[in-house]
Image (tube, rainbow, N blue to C red):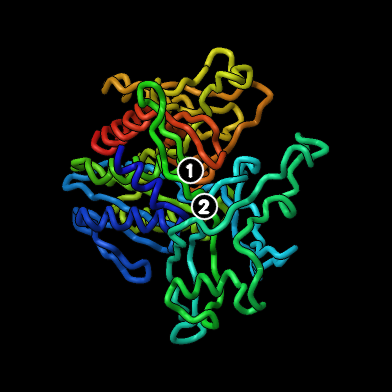
Amino acid sequence: MNKLIDMLKNGKTQFHVVKECAQSFSNNDFKMLDMSKDWGQLAPGKYMVQPFSSMLVAFVIGDNAKHLRVAMAHTDFPCLKLKPNPDIKKSGYLMANVEPYGGLITNTWFDRPLGLAGKIVAKGANAFAPKTLLYDSEKPICIIPNLAPHLKKDKNADIDVQKELIPLISMAEGSSETDKLLRYVADNSGISYDDILDYDLYLYVYEEPQILGMKDEFLSGARIDNISSVCAITNALIESSIKDSISVGVFFDNEEIGSRSKQGADSTLLRDIIERIVPDKNMIYEGFNISCDVAHGLHPNYSEKSDVTNQIILGKGVTLKTSASQRYVTDSEAGAVITALCNEKNIKLQKQVNRSGMAGGQTLGPIVSSYLPIKSVDMGIPMLAMHSARELMHLKDYDYLVELLKEYFTY
């Protein structure tokens, strides 16, 4: 559990999540490969490849590899992204122009200490070789103050994100050149302000994860969706003794905005990598994939939002997600495999379907299955407050997920 809490603390953006994963794999003797080079016939061992700064694939080739086992998750999460030319001076205040990334619950972002993190792209050797570096303010530098209820005509009105989600970062007391957020970023990054060419910077909830509950059974924190899945796959891949399979952990970006990017699931990249590491294409078609993302737990105050006979309770096990519309990729054959594995290994399992008439979400499984047509399931830990600035999970469910992934990789 400490590993998950550490990743929740350190994974401020998708770039930092991948950095954490890559460091963990490197510390456990995974060799970094270069996408631009010919890998040839890889010997049994541990490998990883990072095609882009927010996407990573790690894999273990067993000594007697006969099966393909894939597990995937996404590195991004709903948040607020800094726009170009971000500085706004208004009524003596300095504010930052931001836009929503993904489907965040906007009202949960008010009155929280917020940090700034991401990547900066600066001048390099030439125009086609800029320098990229990660950035983290490492302290809260802004906040989005709420409006007092006495001044609101309609307390339940929709939030105007361009007006109401603009964070306060300082008082505007300097010149137009000194009152610049990017100048602050440059000064704290050890680079020249004039060298900044572009950036992907995001506001993040600075508050740390917190174990809570009368029995210390819950974990509350930002970015549980989907760092919980990323961390579970990472730990399972590292800790498993893999002999009879090629076991692959895949960490995509941009799931929260549809996955249609070079580093997202709706790309040819994973298929390209799989074909390079699997010696026999028949192994691909006989393979198995777990798309690992969080699931909707039953909310005790809104139980009518859940299905009447398939109610997912926190602490009662990992969740297998199905949908008649195939918004979740699980079918009966693939679902039966996971059910049998959980029964055999005594791992608690729940099965989720959405209440009829509610569309629900869609994650990586259906997208990847369109170009990697192997048996696949969508599953993950149940949670409450999904897409809130702080989300809630049960500690036992994470342990069940790690245990399942270990059994899956080594079966």
The amino acid beneath tag 1 is Ala
- Which residue is most to the bottom? 126
Rendered residue at 61%/20% (across/down): 302
Give the tally of numbered discs.
2
Whether residues under marks 1 and 2 lie with C-beta atoms below 8 angstroms apart, the answer is yes
- Residue that carries the numbered disc 1 in the rendered image: 222
- On screen, residue 383 versus residue 247, left or right, reads right
Q: Is residue 398 above or below residue 54?
A: above
Q: Secondary structure at mark 1?
A: loop
- On screen, residue 8 versus residue 384, left or right, reads left
- Residue that carries the numbered disc 2 in the rendered image: 204
- Which residue is most to the top? 309
Rendered residue at 60%/40% (across/down): 108
- On screen, residue 151 versus residue 176, left or right, reads right
The amino acid beneath tag 2 is Tyr
* Alpha-carbon span between mark 1 and mark 2: 8 Å
**Nearer to the camera, 112 or 48:** 112
Mark 2 Cα within 10 Å, few/some/many (few <14, many 20+)? many
Expressed as whole percent of the image width and height from the top left, the position of residue 193 reads 53, 79
